[in-house]
Image (tube, grey):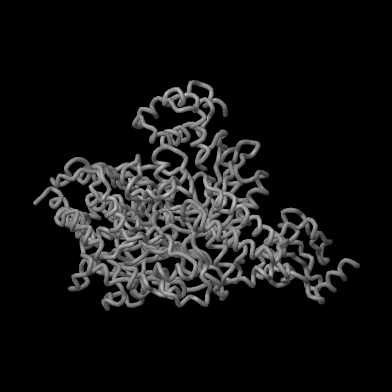
Amino acid sequence: MARSGKKGLPGIADILAKHPASRGSLIPILQDIQERIGYLSQEAVAELEQRMGISANEIFGVATFYTQFRFTPPGRHTILSCQGTACHVRGGRQILNELEQRLGVAAGQTTADGQFDLERVACLGCCALAPVVAVDGKVHVQMTAKKVPSIISQYAEEGKARK
Amino acid sequence: MTSLQQVCAKARAQWDKLQDSEVPVFFVGAATCGRAAGATEVLQALRGHIEQNKLDVLVVEVGCLGPCSFEPLVIVHKSGSPRVCYGNVGPDQVIRILENHVLGDDPCAQWALGKMTPGQRFGPDPRFRGGDVIPAEAGITVEGLDGIDDFAAHPMMRRQVRNILRNCGLIDPENVHHYLARDGYLGFLKALELGPDGVLKEVKAAGLRGRGGAGFPTWRKWQFCRDAPGPTKYLICNADEGDPGAFMNRSLIEGDPHAVLEGMLIAAFTLGASQGYIYCRAEYPLALQRLDVAIGQMRELGLLGENIQGSGFSFDLAIKKGAGAFVCGEETALIASIEGRRGMPQPRPPFPAVSGLLGKPTVIQNVETLGNLPLILRNGAEWYTQYGSESSKGTKTFALAGKIQRTGLVEVPLGIKLKDIICEIGGGVPGGKALKAVQTGGPSGGCIPAEKMDLPVDYETLTQAGSIMGSGGMIVLDEDSCMVDIARYFLSFTQAESCGKCAPCRVGTRAMLNILERIAAGEGQMADLEKLESIARTVKDGSLCGLGQTAPNPVLTTLRYFRNEYEDHIQKRRCPAFVCSAMVSYHIDCDRCSGCGACARVCPVTAISGQKKKPHVIDQEICIRCGMCLSTCPPRYAAVYRRSGELTRYEQRKEGKRETT
């Protein structure tokens, strides 16, 4: 996983070139970096510090404020368990509990085998079909705790097949 | 004739041709909600079938029509027949609709939600155009297909007035010609004609108030900004729809992005702003994509850039992606975020309209407020004010979700009774359960109890009831919802989202949450209720920004209307709705249990034991109260039951009997 972090961070110069050289571009640049390498590594922030002239301290200060940014490499699949109001009243908490149980991690963590990230999100905007879980951007609607194992295995097998 | 008018004329011809198309057309609702429900698979099946059989059939992807619980939605146009809107369409159904209705003569009435007007040819009424959803009171009935009712008479559509959403679900949001054909950008051209002062006058006469929640008169905000010195002004569209349970803005942007962008042009022209930003949540990838496409189209049409349409007015737009911080819905925090800083609010005054982005006068408007502007300009303030109540003019979109039969996005005139939205349009609570409350305004709002369903929905009434209009999320709660849990839920949300800048919000929300957690765990005391109220007042009065000032609302309204539930939790250690798991226990009735073992197999912590064909027992020490056993126990035995508070004497005896055996 450290692969992407170690080698001179391909493309940071390209990303910087795409945005106007102003402080207001900091968040879009961080978003682009995360999109490219999956997270904000120490190395990436150090490089930004040099190129943008904003201290690493300050960059981390901004990045940690926003829930979108992560500082560890992501797992192969990202499971977002929606905890919006509509999902909450329709049992979203039970589904998150079940996911935590089955994956053996708490929300915000990555499974030991690097297969799954489990995240809780405030709202995915699919409230009418609550409760929902999104895996790698695909939204699974009207979830029940019973459907959890089959969804996990579906993606776990996909991973194996690809290997 | 300007070039824009030429394009419009061409667009209209193109649209009319589609409306009167000889070739059958499938309009498939493919917004985020539709895709989640399976619209992608429907599109795939449909396109595959068309290609395989070399059929002459058009497929158009449209936004969301609103009735989300019926998704995926497909509207089918067949020449010489009314259009039919089908609900809950899967890949198999869509093929059968194609085979039986379009190519055959069975309209598949079993899946139809209703018939709509057949393109242009539905009579002389000039108010409606091809593809419009005609309101029931217009008294226009659709001829043909007698077995299918009018879509306009569908209980979910009947009371709606679709002005802001008039294009959603009917046009291809990525085809600007569809928007132009339906009078798109005419409002902006009217604004150029009226001049900035004229527009301000019109918006003032329309009585438009901010749709983001607080309901501040739009014209007054604009006036402040115009009066502020300096030539540089900014306009920001706030599309950081962070309220959990709200999806109005997402639907509007996904279904009709140009409506919002035309509103931005009108606002910017009035303010004299030369640069605009759209601050949209990163969690809405499709909305972001639609905005990106639409902005490109505006550039091509000469609606952005220098000297727009030869008016001397120059304006440009950029999208800023939010990075996941609820507080950035607050104006000053949003500005900080655009400036590349931590999204923490500033004390006001100075208000952003005087000193905002980079210290320049800045107006921030909600997506829906902007979506209203083209309507007001095109049709005039007089037309606009025919909808709504004395103090709250126009229509408003609401997102219905939670324990409600028909979920979805609806648009109604302000002043409509709450029960008309919940019980009539939404169809009330499913499963014969009792309505308990409606939560409006998200984490800043409150719960309005069932006995207040007669209240008219306008800014003042909802505020008096202790809630707020908010941006339009309505979550329906039934008898299975625990009000202490709801209060705790919202508090845990605001507590986690509090930016930590000011102490009342940072410390106060934490202190309130601690008390609520204690009560939910069955360890509350009666004195806690007064303490809660007192902290709530401090947080309300002392917080710096709207997030903190409104964070106590869910607690205060539930205490006001559902105090007895709090008292039950504290005095009887009982959660009447069986939600607070610390006070709920699951048991197996030894006289009913057949020992089938179904519950033991699903129990995630193996708390259930027992021999085959012998009554099973739940070990209360191990049980995590997930309720899987209750939902798994076959109905013919119905042996698992749950209790909150003390067991009845009969039940205690049974528990005892089992322990001795």
The picture quadrant where one finds residue A53 is top left
Q: Quadrant of the C terminus of chain B?
A: bottom right
Report how many numbered discs are placed on residues in the image.
Answer: 0
Any part of residue B643 in sight: no
Give percent across and percent down for residue B136: 31, 76
Q: Is B609 left, or right, of B327 in this rendering?
A: right
Q: Residue furthest left?
A: B1
Give percent across and percent down for residue B600: 76, 59
Q: Residue furthest right?
A: B660
Picture residue at 57% right of the left edge, 34% below the top: A72
Q: Is B410 left, or right, of A63 in this rendering?
A: left
The picture quadrant where one finds residue B86 is bottom left
Residue toward you, B105 or B466? B466
Residue toward you, B306 or B596? B306
Any part of residue B203 in sight: yes
Picture residue at 78% right of the left edge, 57% below the top: B607
Position of B478 relative to B263 (above/below):
below
Give percent across and percent down for residue A160: 59, 38
Q: Is B12 left, or right, of B544 in this rendering?
A: left
Position of B563 relative to B91 (above/below):
below
Give percent across and percent down for residue A134: 52, 49
Q: Is B168 left, or right, of B465 in this rendering?
A: left
Position of B590 relative to B172 (above/below):
below
